[in-house]
Image: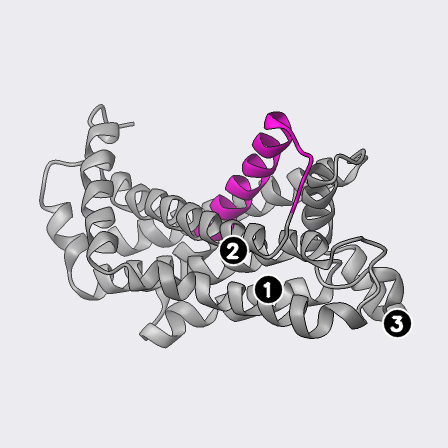
Amino acid sequence: MNKHFLGDTAVLLGRSLRHIARSPDTIITTAIMPIAMLLLFVYVFGGAIETGSDSYVNYLLPGILLITIASGISYTAFRLFGDMQGGIFERFQSMPIARSSVLWAHVLTSLVANLISLVVVVGVALAMGFRTGAGVLGWLAVAGILLLFTLALTWIAVIPGLTAKSVDGASAFSYPLIFLPFISSAFVPTASMPGPVRAFAEHQPVTSIVNAIRDLFTQQPVGTDIWTALAWCVGILVVAFVFADISYRRKIS
């Protein structure tokens, strides 16, 4: 690893964050759709959905947080694609900096931007009546899961950001990820779903992640869900990182 990696990454991270600060509409846009879903499902559909929970906003929030992340990482691919098309990578390659720092700056920017969006969504949920008895450790565990999930999806976003042929292609990959929580336990219990759909919902990553976060918020025993959730996040992260690294090396070679 280049001895200047950390310093180079910090400088490039500052550059990316300044771009976001000058265009806060990116974060606002990222948060608007999850907030709209939160309002729609709680105030329009919530009364008709039986979840066994005293408050539907408490039941719904974990899934909305994952949708917030899935929505946010599309902008990571967009920003990366923009740098690729603008020749920024070629300019950086001519400079004495660690090559991997360019990519890591985008990844860390994604983590910061998504963190801000998540805080905004949680704030709205609190205003809508979301309550939790989770203590500091519970919140730290939730934050850790969300951080790992964001990191995993960000590395997925890196791949189309590097390989897409158009700006639409760079961000379109996020649509299936945004849709995935709808076929999980995020909005309704999986027990209410027909057989094949239920089988898929119970064995896809979002359900275990949502269940683990929900149990942490409600101070329920998390059981095996948290380990399944962590296994999914780590597995996706490793596979995505490998393919992203291969794509990056091909681009800069």
- Secondary structure under the numbered disc 1 in the rendered image: helix
Q: Which image quarter: residue 82? A: bottom left
The image quadrant where one finds the N terminus is: top left
The amino acid type of the residue labelled 2 equals Val
Q: Give me the disc on residue 194.
A: 3
Which of the two discs, 1 and 3, sits closer to the camera? 1
- Secondary structure under the numbered disc 2 in the rendered image: helix
Q: Give me the disc on residue 229.
A: none
Q: Main secondary structure of the magenta part?
A: helix
- Measure the alpha-carbon separation of dots 2 and 1: 9 Å
* Labels 2 and 1 touching (C-beta < 8 A): yes
Please name whichever residue, 169 or 124, is drawn nearer the observer in this view of the structure: 124
Choose the circle earlier in sequence order: 2 or 3. Answer: 2
Residue position marked by numbered label 2 in the rendering:
124
Report x, y in % for residue 7: 20, 29
Choose the circle earlier in sequence order: 2 or 1. Answer: 1
| Vertical placement of residue 36 versus 137, above or below | below
Report x, y in % for residue 67: 56, 60
Report x, y in % for residue 68: 51, 58
- Secondary structure under the numbered disc 3 in the rendered image: loop
Q: Is residue 238 visible?
A: no
Q: Give me the disc on residue 38.
A: 1
The amino acid type of the residue labelled 1 equals Leu
Residue at image location 42% in from the left, 62% down from the top: 30
